[in-house]
Image: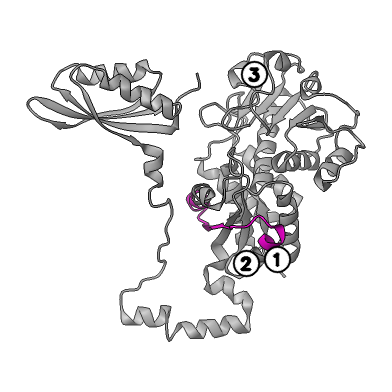
Amino acid sequence: MAAPSPGYSISLRVETPVSFTATSDIATAVAGTGAAVTGLDVIESHHRYMTVAVGCDTVDAAHAERVREAVDAIEGITVHEVTDQTFQLHEGGKIETTLRVPLRTRDDLSRAYTPGVARVCRAIAEDKDLARLYTIKKNTVAVVTDGTAVLGLGDIGPEAAMPVMEGKAALFKQFAGVDAWPVALDTKDTEEIISIVKAIAPAYGGINLEDISAPRCFEIEARLREELDIPVFHDDQHGTAIVVQAALTNALKITGKKIEDVRIAVAGVGAAGTAIIKLLKASGARHIVAAGRAGIIERGSQHADANRQWLADNTNEERFSGSLKEAVVGRDVFIGVSAPNLLDETDVAAMNEDSIVFAMSNPDPEVHPATASKHAAIVATGRSDFPNQINNVLAFPGFFRGLLDAEASDITDEMLVVAAEAIAGTITDEELNPSFIIPSVFDPEVSLRVAAAVAAVATPRG
């Protein structure tokens, strides 16, 4: 059974007869279903009954219903209300705009709006660069999606993508002080997306492309980088790659292996997989094979898609041919950004000694971490309920903070490399261990280090 998760947390409002064992009976019933009790509080107490609030993490919606039934089955107890805490958190959205200046008097209004604002408008009309000084542009990012590749959900549309885009905006603000706003586009047309983003760009200091399906995401990013004077960053590609590289840097320290020597297998050749491989090579990796649905991409094979062709030309120097399972035999590193349950214990056991397994398919990894850890020296996933979570939140807030602070107009491989080094360096050698190769997203040092590293190598506009 999968582990309970805060993503499926519920709260129950329960009425029970007054009893010294009432709360323990409820806790026992909840725990008996496999749920994790996170809170239990008597919120009302009368001479004959009590009202108890119970919070717990469950596995899924069906599990939540079993929890309700188990509590309701206790003699004398009635469950009056069950609330899905995740849906409750999203009610009304997760972000809002706030004012940075006072608007309390007529004088405030005259300066912030008419007539005073006209003077600022005229100044910007004469020198557009002043928009960075006198508008939100200097600190604002557009989080742009068409809703075609949302998390592990696929093409669910722009409306359904909004909770994720709001979440990204919230993370920008929380971890790097960057103001971000969701821009969900009701079109899948590549040229139309490019045109729309170019049209809205004057209001923003950077563009974060998010959850746009491959291969369109590659062209959209490349064109926008070429045609805009502000940085454009596809987080599904580069954010993932940065954090994977950071985690691998520290994992290799523990195992005593060098990136130029290790043999790496990557499962998944979409946006994330391709970007990971490019950054691995930029960081010195030489022995990489990449696997898609049809198996290993063979050296010298021909592909209509330009990114697949790049992989065919730049990976698999040993000219291996076969399946992913065959390819992991004798490998030092497995990196998965693909699909659940691709590997089993036998596959991990066939890897080299002190192997490294990054199984990042969400919510179910390519191989269960408990299984992989029987043979691998270091295991990481994309999930928060296992050690070593490889999470984009470690990268994109600080990365954009650095870009905005430097007023950068472009993104380079050097920026990606130094960002990964900054994340890895947040953990000291004394702290480093097989269950701690990547810092917590709540470590305030991470965004500061990434921002400083990126700003140091950025080339300012003009």
The residue shown at (55%, 85%) is: 122
Residue 213 appearing in the image: yes
Check disc 1 and give the amino acid type. Answer: Leu
Q: CA distance from mark 3 to mark 1?
A: 44 Å
> Which span of residues is magenta-colored?
169-194
Check disc 2 and give the amino acid type. Answer: Ala
Residue named by callout 2? 201
Q: Residue furthest left?
A: 47
How is colour applied across the structure in the image? one colour
Splitting the image into 4 quarters, where does residue 371 fall? Answer: top right
The residue shown at (52%, 82%) is: 120
In this orientation, which residue lies closer to the viewer: 81 or 35?
81
Residue named by callout 3? 372
Q: CA distance from mark 3 to mark 2?
A: 45 Å
- Position in image of residue 72 (x %, y %): 26, 22
Identify the element where label 3 is drawn: helix
> Magenta segment: does it hold 392?
no
